[in-house]
Amino acid sequence: MILTQGMFENVSNVTAKGSVFGIRNGQLRYGKNKVCHNSGWYNKHGDKLGWGDLSKLDMIAIAKEIDENDVFIILGEQDSYWKFVEFSKDGPTTIKGDEQSPGADYVWSKARYIIEKNRINAVVRFMYSDLKDDVWSGVPYTHAVPDSVKTIYNKYMV
């Protein structure tokens, strides 16, 4: 399956039959398995697929079901939405730039997580010696430093 802009159903569409990876736009997740809050979801080309909370189980499902030639990139709420909002004295007014398709360079440089087939990469901008890689339900969960992100980028984009 090709990951395309706007491909996820809204969480309010209760009549929808199933959803890709079991996730929907605007979804909320609670509890200790929640990993991301109001994150933006992108394909490798920088097109926004959707947004919402993601849990550990969501990320595992994505890693197990995603096509081998694609990646699912997760940005934080600030980088995926608020950096595109223009404010006036009356509050948020317009979206500046292309919030729905900011491009590959932007998305790859702001990535918090990069999910590949059977691998979850947590992007680390600062080195912490106590970070440990792990395995989540058979899916490797690793920490990727900026040089590792470049390697992943080259694998899918060059």
Image (cartoon, rainbow, N blue to C red):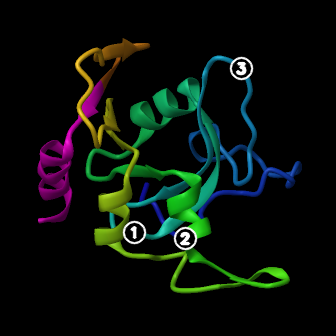
Q: Residue furthest front?
A: 89
Q: Residue at x 15, y 53 (%)?
A: 150
Residue density around tag 1, few if under 14, some if 14–19, many if 20 or more, within 10 Å: many
Residue 31: give its label: 3
Q: Which residues are magenta?
A: 142-158
CA distance separating discs 3 and 1: 30 Å
Q: Position of residue 11 (x, y in %)?
A: 79, 50
Residue 83: give its label: 2
Q: Position of residue 121 (x, y in %)?
A: 31, 35
For the residues bearing labels 2 and 3, Cβ distance under 8 angstroms: no
Q: Position of residue 70 (x, y in %)?
A: 32, 53
| Front in this rendered view, residue 22 or 154 | 154
CA distance separating discs 2 and 3: 28 Å
Which three-letter amino acid code belongs to the residue tagged 1? Gly
Q: Is 24 drawn above or below residue 42 in the view shown?
A: above
Which three-letter amino acid code belongs to the residue tagged 2? Lys
CA distance separating discs 2 and 1: 15 Å
Q: Quadrant of residue 63?
A: top left
Q: Is 40 drawn above or below residue 60 in the view shown?
A: below
Q: Is 90 drawn above or below residue 10 in the view shown?
A: below
Secondary structure state at the residue bearing disc 1: loop
Which three-letter amino acid code belongs to the residue tagged 3? Gly
Secondary structure state at the residue bearing disc 2: helix
Main SS type for the magenta part?
A: helix
- Earlier sequence position, callout 2 versus callout 1: 1
Say which residue label 1 marks.
46
